[in-house]
Image (cartoon, rainbow, N blue to C red):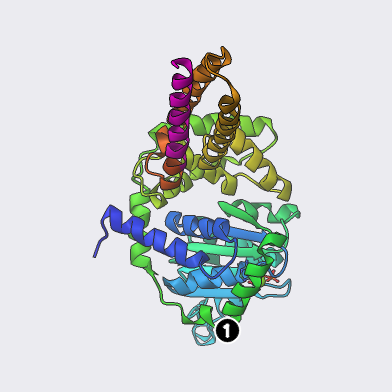
Amino acid sequence: MSLSFEEAVAKARTFFRELGAPFVGRQEESMVITLSLICGEHAVLIGEPGTAKSAMVRRAANLLNARFFKYLLTKYTEPSELFGPLDIRALRKGVYARVTRGKLPEAEIAFLDEIFNASSAILNTLLSLMMERVIYDGYLELRTQLWSLFGASNKVPEEPELEALYDRFLLRTHVKPLDQDYWAELLEASWRIETGVLGEVKPVLSMEDLVAINSFALKVNLENVKSSLLKLLLILEEKGLHVTDRRKGKILKVIAAHALLNGRSVATEDDLIVLKYTVPKSLEDFERIQVILLEELRTRERVLKELNEIRTNVRTAAAKIKQLGPFDPRLTDYYKNLKIAKNKVLSLIKDFDDDEEVVKIANEIVSEIDDLLDVITAKLNV
Ligand SMILES: Nc1ncnc2c1ncn2[C@@H]1O[C@H](COP(=O)(O)OP(=O)(O)OP(=O)(O)O)[C@@H](O)[C@H]1O
Ligand SMILES: [Mg+2]
């Protein structure tokens, strides 16, 4: 059964919503995991202990009907623990083989906790597995069905030998502990989790669905965003946020996945927000990119922020206008400025006409402005 575009979008959204549902404040992480699955790419979650990194990846696996392999790496983990023990019977016949049942070579989705503990033997195998989906092992060349590999770690790797592994995670997110404002909610959520909410998960997505969703994502029209992406990459490079060549092109996939998740078959500048998950390398980068994107992109957050500023200005003006007597010359200035503000609101929401919240706020402001314009007209025509 193949999905229609709308069904693909609906399935991807359901997965995204369900993934984050039991957790407090983990929308970004749910987004990163969902986008990597849509792209068939790998993601790494970096954050201090106890921030629900493992819990989120486990939930993602439970929501997927897929062959899943998970393992916690230590410095002493042997290749056979991940790739399967050597097949002794085969070896006796002079054949080098591994018993891969239930191990990483057979997984569609994998989770390697503390991934940067990987020893050099494991590291080399992981590099080709992640890039080419092939395991080179002695004389063996094993083609695998790996779709996405998730990693978790308490820190960004600093060792040069881990650089190549880190680079293979197209998506990265810094999982931060929750702000105090969320602690009450956290207690409730943890309690629900402790008492078994996570245990009763039903899959909402199959590998077949993922393949279909992925092929829709690969058909998303990216023509409108390529030049903006280029411009942004140049700005970022100038500010010291370097993106390796491998990642530059791959970012387009994530942009396409974001468009799909938002129900669009054409990417817009809004989708460039995914640079937040694909550009940062160091922990400081995660903070810096937010600021840069907010400045450079007309993102939803930015539009909401500007709308709120306009609303505050309109309300300040309303208070002043009430105090002015009829025929006050300042009324004409207010009239002009309110007209400008109204046009600004209308132009701000141009790309957001299917966003209910943005449209609602904009309509409220416009009607406040219209009321004020009436008040001014009345005062000028007494
Ligand atoms: N944001 C959150 N919302 C709900 N529960 C949370 C949240 N953060 C942590 N918890 C609770 O804390 C538990 C611990 O999380 P988990 O073991 O996944 O952390 P971790 O980030 O993998 O830690 P480590 O780095 O030590 O492996 C979760 O199973 C959950 O019960
Ligand atoms: Mg963990």
Farthest front residue in view: 382
Q: Residue at 53%, 46% (x, y): give it.
A: 274
Ligand 2 lies in quarter: bottom right
Rendered position, 275 above or below 139: above
x, y percentage for residue 379? 48, 20
Question: Residue 111 is drawn in which quadrant?
Answer: bottom right
User: Vertically, is 360 above or below 327?
Assistant: below
The quarter of the picture where the C terminus appears is top left
Asked whether residue 87 is in view, the answer is yes
Quarter where residue 108 is shown: bottom left
266 or 161: nearer the eye? 266
Rate crowding at label 1 as few (under 14), some (14 to 19) or many (20 or more) other CA atoms within 10 Å.
few
From the viewer's side, name the closer residue of 156 and 167.
Answer: 156
Residue at the (73%, 75%) spot, across then down: 76
Please indicate, yes or no, whether residue 143 appears anywhere in the rendered image: no
Q: Position of residue 21 (x, y in %)?
A: 51, 67
Identity, as a three-letter code, of the amino acid under mark 1: Thr
Q: Residue at x 62, y 30 (%)?
A: 235
Q: Would you identify the image quadrant in which residue 288 lies?
A: top right
Taking 289 as reference, is 168 above or below it?
A: below
Give the vertical position of 301 relative to 67 (above or below): above
Helix, strand or loop: magenta stretch: helix
Left or right for 115, reference 171? right
Residue under pointer 1:
195
* Quadrant showing the N terminus: bottom left
Residue sitting nearer the eye, 284 or 179: 179
Which region of the structure is painted magenta?
361-382
Asked if residue 98 lies in the magenta stretch, the reply is: no
Q: Is residue 380 left or right of residue 114?
A: left
Percent coordinates x, y for residue 291 in the rendering: 65, 39
